[in-house]
Amino acid sequence: MRQKEMKAKASKVVIKEIRFGPNTDDHDFDFKLKHAKKFLEDGAKLKAFVFFKGRSILFKDKGEILLLRFAQELEDYGKVEQLPKLEGKRMIMFISQKKK
């Protein structure tokens, strides 16, 4: 019985994904940034990733720069949980909400 109550009190962690291409331009970037801020304010975790398709894998550094810039813009809203790391064709980074 007690475990059931504890389970009810545990908050579900929502993970929102934000996907970029290696050549995402500024307008798209700002648009996604706005969404990301909203997600973090709602208490969700963010999984931001750059998806490389075909030969764009050559621009790994571009993708990393993009993600780090993204993290920097979100500094006031969240903290980086995992720095960008390449998994197959995607470079993934986790950002979680900053404790109030």
Image (cartoon, rainbow, N blue to C red):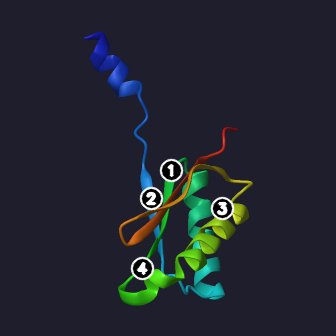
Marks 3 and 4, how far apart at CA: 19 Å
From this viewpoint, is residue 31 visible? no
Q: 96 or 50, which is in the foreground?
A: 50
Do callouts 2 and 4 mark residues in contact (Cβ within 8 Å)? Answer: no
Q: Nearer the viewer, mark 2 or mark 4?
A: 4
Q: Which marked residue is nearer to the observer: mark 3 or mark 4?
A: 4
Which of the two labelled residues, at mark 2 and mark 4, occupies the earlier sequence position? 2
Q: Tell me the tag on residue 91.
A: none
Dot 2: element: strand
Q: Amino acid at mark 2?
A: Lys
Q: How many marks?
A: 4
Residue at 29% over, 15% down: 3
Provide the residue designation for mark 3: 71
- Taking the image as shown, residue 36 lies to the left or right of residue 5, namely right
Query: Where residue 16 is drawn, which disc sits there?
Result: 2
Q: Are marks 2 and 3 in contact (CB under 8 Å)?
A: no
- Label 1 and label 3: CA atoms lie apart by 15 Å
Instruction: Give the mark nearer the N terminus: 1 vs 2.
Output: 2
Separation of residues labelled 4 and 1 (CA atoms): 25 Å
Q: Position of residue 66 (x, y in %)?
A: 62, 74
Outermost residue, front direction?
58
Q: Secondary structure at mark 3?
A: helix
Q: Nearer the viewer, residue 33 or 56?
A: 56
Q: Nearer the viewer, mark 1 or mark 3?
A: 3
Identified at 65% across, 86% down, the residue is 26
Which residue lies at the image location 59% right of the left edge and 70% below the top edge? 64
Q: Is residue 2 visible?
A: yes
